[in-house]
Image (cartoon, rainbow, N blue to C red):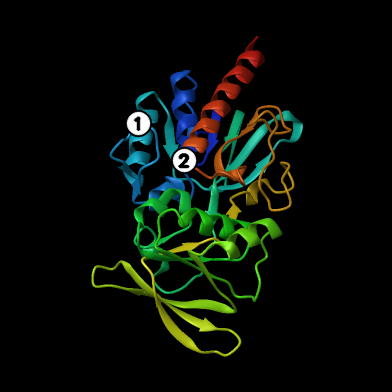
Amino acid sequence: MLSLSMEKVIIVGSGCAGLTAAIYAARANLTPLVLEGPQPGGQLSTTTLVENYPGFPDGIEGPQLIMNMHQQAEKFGARFSYAEVEDFDVANKTIRIKADDEWIETQSLIVASGASARWLNLDDEQKLIGHGLTSCATCDGAFYKNVPVCVIGGGDSAAEESIFLTRFASKVYLIHRRDKLRASKIMADRVLANPKIEPIWNTVITKYITDEKGEMSAVRLRNVTTQEERDLPVACVFVAIGHDPNTKPFQGKLETDPEGYLLANRLVESKHPGVFIAGDVSDRVYKQAVTAAGTGCAAAIEAERYLSDLAS
């Protein structure tokens, strides 16, 4: 059951940004209410080993990192609800959130609802995430040294991921459904000049093929021009066809860029007093756990300052 009284701080989302905000807000005795939404823990909850989060020289499993942060926030007084945000309103200077058919009023709000990677919607796709299927080369590329991998996409993100992966993989296949890249000319030129990257044009993936352990071993390709199919051995598939920010309840009410990412001033401030933004919901560039945590920290500090000014 959600609170029917005025909250001091509501945090939407429970990934790295939301949980860091919860830790800081709770330590400031603001007893934040965290609305975890449909995917508690965010994208890290589907990640296996995280090797690039500071303080864990041997790495840490994504779900374990999220659990640790959750426990830390609870220890200081954060409260959690699985409620999913449906609507948002700031009429008459009152901040209101509708979650599970209930409107809740709050003095401040931190939107840390994250972004969701776009996938191919093939069979067993969700089961393979973290087992040879990922949407983040920076996160997972180092796990695939001296083995062939493939990248799906044709834009700047796909080009950047392909180039990054050449540091580790023995071969990077760039699979694109068209006959030329949509990436900027400078990025496309870098891809085509790299001897470790082999573009496969006019082609889509129709099936993931796994080994006896359930790990990715190959993909089935279909040429969209000839309809011919073949299997390509790869150890990992990096899907780079974009992300969708989880901003549906805030569309038309908070400022967004053309792709729907929330716009923030001074790192975390929205145009509405008392409403702050953190994490991948506004990050089109880095999309890392540590950068999300940093903005979660900043949002909580700004919320605390805002509430202090209200009380004075």
The amino acid beneath tag 1 is Gly
Q: Mark 1 against mark 2, which lies toward the viewer?
A: 1
Q: Quadrant of the C terminus?
A: top right
* Disc 1 + disc 2, Cβ < 8 Å: no
Query: Foreground: 187 or 226?
Result: 187
Work out whether residue 29 or residue 18 is closer to the camera in this orientation and state it: 18
Which quarter of the figure is the N terminus placed in?
top left
- Relative vertical location of residue 8 with respect to residue 230 in this rendering, above or below: above
Determine which quarter of the picture holds residue 155. Answer: bottom right
Residue 207 percent across, percent down from the top left: 43, 77
The x and y percentages for residue 3 are 50, 34
Secondary structure under tag 2 reads helix
- Can you say whether 151 is above or below 88 in the image? below
Q: Nearer the viewer, residue 135 or 244?
A: 135
Is residue 6 visible in the rendered structure shown here?
Answer: no
* Circle 1 residue: 55
Report the residue that reaches farthest toward the top.
312
Residue 252, x across and y down, in percent: 74, 47
Question: Which residue is disc 2 drawn over?
Answer: 289
**Sequence-earlier tag: 1 or 2:** 1
Local crowd at mark 2 within 10 Å, few (<14), some, or many (≥20)? many
Q: Amino acid at mark 2?
A: Ala
**With respect to residue 310, does 245 lie above or below?**
below
Residue 196 seen in the figure: yes
